[in-house]
Image (cartoon, rainbow, N blue to C red):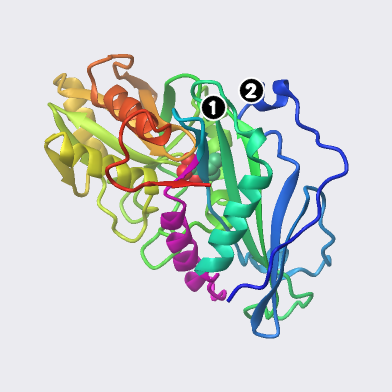
Amino acid sequence: MLATISLTRTPQSRLTEDLRENSPFGTNYSDHMFVADYADGKWQDPRIIPFGPMQLSPATTALHYGQSLFEGFKAHRTADSRVALFRPMANHARLNRTAARLAMPEIPEEIFREGLLELVRVDKEWTPYRDGGSLYVRPVYFGTDDSLMVRPATRYRFVIITSPGGPYFAQPIRLLAEETYVRAFPGGTGDAKTAGNYGGGLLAAKLAQAKGYHNVMWLDGKDRRFIEESGVMNIMFNINGTAITPALSGTILPGVTRDSVLTLLREMKVKLEERPVSLDEVLAAHSNATLHEAFGIGTAAIIAPIAAIGHHGKDHEIPTGSTTGLAHQLRTTLTNIQTGRVPDTHNWLLYI
Ligand code: COI
């Protein structure tokens, strides 16, 4: 049984309409955060406190040896004037799979769920009203030993912060097929949401951005032949009406939005293939005009149409903006479910 969550309210809320409605993705944070610590083999002191800096030893395990992971999901205002979280317990399950991969203790369901619900209730007013807006929820979990020994920490901290904002990408994205750096290798951490996976991707993204792309299209680590992900998102192609996405092979993050999209496509009776998909196949489909769409799939962007794939000095332009294509249909259906505009037949919403 979870110890009672203590609540220390901020003396002065920072909430303004401008912060709530106009914050770009991931730039401003609500008034409070949830914190729980693991020490002496148990979780303790679950608390909601004012959002602010944390004091950590310079020897903190997470900083040196990367025992750090995160999650992300969203809360939306719903058509009946409530606030609902989208599939947060699927993120909890993935969080614990990542924790196991990093030799970190499990976070019990009640700590995650009760801390989350209480926090979002306390800062509910930070949830944007605008279309496309959401309160992005960011759990982060890391080792806090102050020891330079390379071993799993004995102490950990779990924090949840929330951030009002809009979509991650405002326009279709341009990707560069990445042939030098790799995101993941079989047996590595590619299918876990470790902080290190994102740090390891930054240089390739930065180099691609210097060439005018938004990010890279990751290829497999062994042969640089098969497509794996789109920047920090899963990826899907519409080739001649068939939705094709790389199968979860151990090097690909099992996205919650990806899973939701697959469910919706099955219900839409769209032909769907989860299998290895090579860059050659996609470029061949582009040249014979059967590559109808490509898009990234992630929590932050939901569906991000891909406008071009750069490869060997050539940009392969892909149509975007169709209102009858899969990307548009999926985005509309998902956002309608998230905002309670259509019945939640999958039980994906958790009302606060
Ligand atoms: C997502 O959209 O699923 C992400 O993980 C992106 C986040 C790192 C901003």
Identify the residue at image location x=76%, y=31%.
15
Q: Which residue is mark 2?
A: 21
Does any portion of residue 228 appear in the rendered image?
A: no
**Residue 158: quarter of image:** bottom right
State which tag comes first along the sequence, 1 or 2: 2
Residue closer to the observer: 113 or 213: 113
Is residue 103 covered in magenta? yes
Q: Quick one: label 2, few (<14), some, or many (20+) residues within 10 Å?
A: some
What percent of the width, then of the height, locates residue 269? 11, 36
Residue in the picture at 80% in, 70% down: 59
Mark 1 CB near ligand 1 (8 Å cut) = no
Q: Is residue 144 above or below residue 173?
A: below
Q: Which residue is under mark 1? A: 133
Does any portion of residue 324 appear in the rendered image? yes
Say what amino acid the circle numbered 1 marks.
Answer: Gly
Query: What are the residue bounds of the magenta stretch?
Result: 84-108
Of the pair 350 and 209, the residue shown nearer to us: 350
Residue occupying image coordinates x 58% and y 37%: 135
Location of residue 270 in the rendering, given as x and y in whole percent from the top left corner = 13, 34
- Per the model, the C-alpha gap separating discs 1 and 2 is 7 Å
